[in-house]
Image (cartoon, helix red, strand yellow):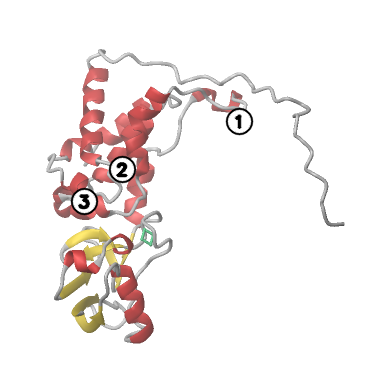
Amino acid sequence: MKIKVKVSRFDPDKSPERYFSEYELEVSEGMTVLDGLIWLKENADPTISFRYSCRMGVCGSCAMMINSYPHLACHTQILEITKSVLVLEPLCNHANVRDLICDFSAFFEKHRTIKPHLLREDAEKLDLTGEISQTPQELESYLQFSYCIKCGICVAACPTCATDKEYLGPQALAQAYRYTQDSRDAGGDKRIEAAAEGHGIHHCHYAGACSEACPKGVDPAFAIQLFRKQMVLRSLGLKETRPPAGEMPPMTLNPKPNIPKPPEPTIK
Ligand code: FES
């Protein structure tokens, strides 16, 4: 089956205007948008610019607007979206720098604001070769939110990000909850401070568009609600603050493991 593909083009060195280039593409069952783009670049127009790396929904670099909705190009089959016209544009709410490529500097700056790593005062005293204990229930309480691949799709779908460029955004806020909820962390107060000030968590309208669009099922809107609940409970003194989880005792390995000898070779 042949379909029409319209690709948004932009080269600020040549013109400040965006325009569409149109191509014809032979589509087969199972072909992804990324497969189609790679075919077009190799066979029709080598100047089309887009980003990708893993081709398997892990690196998050191929996110773009596909028929006006944010998706991962490598995770979206063309025939599931359209049988006639495929329109490809750069992600909304991110600065477009070339064709389908966006600049993620502001996105990662916001992510950095909420301190996306474990924070604890005793970090220097810990034996970094050991393990910190965590029960399966403690892991379960944040695991879903740790699946974020930083593709920027939730920000592209968010109506608040569309109107407020300073808003921290669903990705950063969901990760603020993910690390605060981690039983190995003790930096919740610092993250709450970062998330509450300026254009932070209180600007979320709970539209839920971020959770609907997320290709990894992270559900940032739910994380934001849980984080907000935690903020309110802490401010009222109703949330017990716990010390971060401690180290596990070192594991003792059998110094001489009983490994059976391999059989003698039958051919010398
Ligand atoms: Fe890595 Fe699509 S290429 S997520």
* Residue 41 in the image: above or below residue 66: below
- Whole-percent x, y for residue 29 in the image: 27, 70
Q: Residue at x 35, y 34 (%)?
A: 178
Residue indicated by mark 2: 172
Residue type for callout 2: Ala
Of residues 35 and 177, the one nearer the viewer is: 35
Of residues 35 and 63, the one nearer the viewer is: 35
Q: Residue at x 21, y 22 (%)?
A: 232
Q: State the image quarter where residue 267 is shown.
A: bottom right
Real-space Cα distance between discs 1 and 2? 27 Å
Residue type for callout 3: Ala
Horizontal placement of 245 versus 125: left or right? Answer: left
Which residue reaches farthest front? 266
Name the N-terminal-most of marks 3 and 2. Answer: 2
Residue indicated by mark 3: 213
Horizontal placement of 196 versus 51: left or right? Answer: left
Judge the density around disc 3: few (<14), some (14-19), many (≥20) Cα neighbours within 10 Å. many
Can residue 66 be seen from the camera position used here?
no
Q: State the image quarter where residue 221 is shown.
A: top left
Q: Residue at x 68, y 22 (%)?
A: 252
Is label 2 in a helix, a strand or a loop? helix
* Residue 116 in the image: above or below residue 40: above
Real-space Cα distance between discs 3 and 2? 16 Å
Circle number at residue 7: none
Report whether the residue tagged 1 is closer than 8 Å to ligand 1: no
Residue indicated by mark 1: 128
Can residue 267 be seen from the camera position used here?
yes
Name the N-terminal-most of marks 3 and 1. Answer: 1
